[in-house]
Image: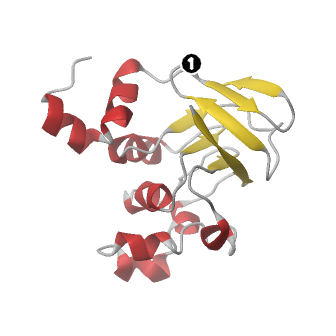
Amino acid sequence: MLRGKAWKFGDDISTDHITPGRYYHLRSNLPELAKHVMEDANPEFAKKVSKGDFIVAGKNFGCGSSREHAPLAIKLAGVSAVIAKSFARIFYRNAINVGLPVLIANTDEIDEGDELEVDLSSGIIRDVTKGIEIKAKPMPEVMLRILEAGGLVNYVKNYGDIKV
């Protein structure tokens, strides 16, 4: 069970919002890059996010370039999962590959600062602040196994080929 505070963002949050291009030179220093995560969408986010918090967004989260640094920087900033109405396909895959949980759900009822509990295996998002439950699109079992291993590279190192 994951638990943390919701940080709310809108539609079409691009990889440039997540990891601004002006920090591209930090791609070999990911902990430093993570200090700037979401800076162009919310300048205070990286300074105030707490370990376990959630990014909650609208449609098309992670659109733009295919840089895998974007989900990795989110993970290194301490975010436990991203919940959005939809994701750009390459961002979704990159997130799973680096071990960042991503859930597709209707995020309209979640507000900034709401306390959330998320059960990845059932796909249930509980907004503790409002006392409501939201059902996320279930993640395939193989993706849950990759996330449990900490990402695709760790999974393959530990278990060999993926069994689907």
Query: In the shown orientation, is residue 67 left or right of residue 120?
Result: left
x then y, percent, for residue 36: 53, 74
Quarter of the picture containing the N terminus is top right
The figure's colour scheme reads secondary structure
x then y, percent, for residue 101: 48, 39
Q: Which residue is mark 1?
A: 122
For disc 1, the neighbor class at 10 Å (few under 14, some 14 to 19, many from 20) is: few
Which residue is more in the foreground, 102 or 79? 79
For the image shown, how many numbered marks are present on the structure? Answer: 1
x then y, percent, for residue 135: 68, 22
Q: Is residue 32 above or below residue 112?
A: below
- Furthest-right residue in this view: 130
Whether residue 136 can be seen here: no
Q: At x 67% / y 34%, what residue is drawn?
A: 117
Task: Indicate the quadrant where residue 38 lies.
Answer: bottom right
Q: At x 51% / y 57%, what residue is drawn?
A: 78
Q: At x 34% / y 27%, what residue is drawn?
A: 145
Q: At x 58% / y 45%, what residue is drawn?
A: 82
Q: Classify mark 1: helix, strand or loop.
A: loop
Quarter of the picture containing the C terminus is top left
- Please state which amino acid type lies under the numbered disc 1: Ser
Query: In the shown orientation, is residue 4 left or right of residue 81?
Result: right
Whether residue 104 can be seen here: yes
Which residue is more in the foreground, 23 or 98? 98
Task: Indicate the quadrant where residue 142 lies.
Answer: top left
Query: In the shown orientation, is residue 77 left or right of residue 84?
Result: left
